[in-house]
Image (cartoon, grey):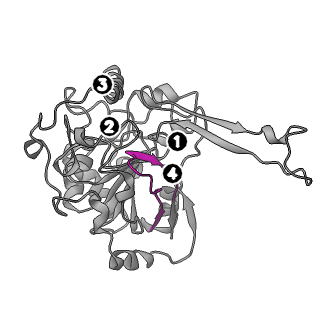
Amino acid sequence: MRIAGLAAFIGIAALSVLAPLAPAGAADCKALVKPSPFGPDDQTGATNRVTAAVTKAAAAEIQTGVVTPMANVLVDGVPLFGTRFSKTVLTSFAITPGAEFGNNKLTYMEDTYLSQSHVGTHIDGVGHIGVQDCYYNQTPMGKYVTQNNLKRLGLENLKTFATRGVILDMVKVFQAAGKLKSNPACRTPCLDGGTLITVDDLQAGLKMYNETLREADAVFIHTGWEDLFQQWPAQNATYNKSEPGIGKAAADWLVSQKVILVGSDTWAVEVIPGEEESIAFPVHQTLITDNGIHIVENVRTDLIAAQAAQTGRGTFFLSMTVPKAVGLTGTFVNIEAIQ
């Protein structure tokens, strides 16, 4: 799908919040969306797989205590998709003479975020993507949309992300296969926009560090595209114009591995332009809508990829918390890899 079409898609989605919703039952959600494997009332999604045993096993990844950051800084000016916006406002009037509090002249400052939730390093909740009126677990969302938030499928339903993380270094995979085509704007090696990452590529990334995926893993894909994000605002247009990423077959394979999260150093995780121009974000639909698997975008993967190359370990304990934000479709997150 071309970027102009994608921007229009987002604009239409935003307008639809203000427009009257389609009558309940207008779409057959049982025909359009798969049922949740966790039951007809499930609102949680794949984090149901993170059990006490999963977290205990993941804790064994902490051997040296080295913590590697995996989130980009959240600051005005970074690349934003489509018509999204983000602006911070500092409230500092109390430091002006005469505005202090008490005899001790106490002052304070605080901030206001004027921002959409899907900016910077952020998570896509199960209320983010649907087909017509049908969302995760065959939910007819028109019944649950209010002016302020969702009455179902909000982020407050998530369980923990205390699990094992796995980094798949596609830059090294493509270099080893002799098929790396880097974008000239990247200062370090990167997969060029439009590069399709296949199942074989993902499996080669696992083989590089003698790993296999296990249920409840969180998978992070390093493409090098992050280099352009780091050059904000100079390369914002290039970063947003296209991206390397996985296709539908790779998404289906990750579903079969029962992972709970797929993240990447790109703005959509999936290859853009897509494999079929007429199909909008098929990987998002497969992972989120049909399987409740969360997507994390704009991840900083370069540091953990370098750490993996140095230590020969592509796995880590994932430290990521998501605010219990009632009725939200997504939010910015901080991510750290602990080894």
Q: Nearer the viewer, mark 3 or mark 4?
A: 3
Mark 2: which amino acid? Thr
Q: Are marks 4 and 1 in contact (CB under 8 Å)?
A: yes
Spatial CA distance of label 1 from label 2 is 16 Å
Residue at which label 3 appears: 19
> 10 Å neighbourhood of mark 2: few (<14), some, or many (≥20)?
many
Q: Nearer the viewer, mark 2 or mark 3?
A: 3
Residue at which label 2 appears: 195
- In the displayed structure image, the side of residue 332 where residue 202 appears, left or right: left
Spatial CA distance of label 2 from label 3 is 37 Å
Residue 74 on image: x %, y %: 58, 43
Q: Are marks 1 and 3 in contact (CB under 8 Å)?
A: no
Magenta stretch, residue numbers: 317-335
Q: Is residue 327 magenta?
A: yes
Mark 3: which amino acid? Ala
- Location of residue 337 with respect to 194 vertically, above or below: below
Mark 4: which amino acid? Asp
Tell which of 286 and 232 is nearer to you.
286
Tell which of 339 and 90 is nearer to you.
90
Spatial CA distance of label 4 from label 2 is 18 Å
Residue at which label 1 appears: 188
Residue at which label 4 appears: 302
